[in-house]
Image: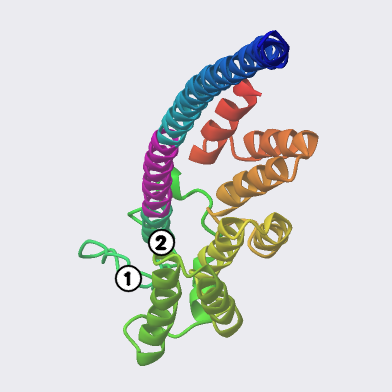
Amino acid sequence: MTRRSLPLRSIAAALLAAVLAAQPARSALFDDDEARKRIEQTNQRVAQVEKQLGDRIAALEAQLKSQGLVELFSQVEQLKSDVARLRGQIEVLNHEQEQVQKRQRDLYIDLDSRLRRLEGGPGASATPAGGGAAGAPAPSGPAPNAPSAAAADVPAAPAAAVAGRPGAGTPDAANEQKSYDAALDQFKAGNYGAAIAGFASFVKTFPKSPLAPSAQYWIGNAQFAQKDYRAAIASQRQLVAAYPDSQKVPDALLNIATSQFELGDGAASRRTLEQLIAKHPQSEAAGKARQRLAIR
């Protein structure tokens, strides 16, 4: 009995030892599972933190982008407003320039009309009874209606000028007036090229007409309006040379001085203005020349 119990005891001891030996292994297995769980939890928290940080960074970027677009949009709107304001100012300046040009044309036309009346050209008003028709040859004796001081620049022998053209009231005289008026209408309309051609044709066709100096003067003015200042100077000098006694000469000299000034030759412009004042001190153009010299 004792001998049989020994093996059983040995077996029981071995089993007990095996059980005891298995306890640490099971415990170690449980410890690994717990560590994995904690690692997974930690990874989840890290992922959540990363997601939160990513969301916050994206929100900040969106906010910055939004603020940049708003600022850019504001700048664009400001530029649009500035452009609109500048366009309005340009329109106002263009309108003022058109009005100034219109007033200048009206002034030129008014001066031309008055000079035509003084020179006794076609279309001038008839003289009082007893004074004879406008443009008729002067009587041999002293005329009862002597020309006024304003007509001092009229040629000394108007009869000679009249003799070179058809008499007033004839079809040729009507054509002369029509040709001149047609060129003047082109100038009024701002068709300066057509006006130059019309006045040049008039001067060539009617070189002895009392209107020829005015036509030559308007050629220079039309060239000045085209900003062809050198051509304007040449045309006005041609007037001064061909018609030195015309009342258009002071205005031609003033136009020459203005053209020289536009070309940047201030010294030549000053000399021309001084020449104008010296030769035609009582003219309206001389008054303007004095004003310009006082400013410069």
- Element type at mark 1: loop
Residue at the image point whose x is 56% and y is 73% from the top = 193
**Residue situated in front as seen by the camera: 47 or 123:** 47
Residue at the image point whose x is 42% and y is 57% from the top = 112
What amino acid does circle 1 point to? Gly
Mostly what secondary structure, the magenta segment?
helix
- Image quarter of the C terminus: top right
Q: Residue 88, relative to residue 244: is it above or below?
A: above
Q: Which residue is mark 2?
A: 116
Residue 157 sits inside the magenta stretch:
no
Residue 105 sits inside the magenta stretch:
yes
Residue at the image point whose x is 56% and y is 57% from the top = 225
Residue 156 in percent (x, y) is at 56, 59
Left or right, residue 199 beside residue 114: right
What amino acid does circle 2 point to? Arg
Q: Which residue is mark 1?
A: 123
Q: Residue 209, relative to residue 28: is it above or below?
A: below
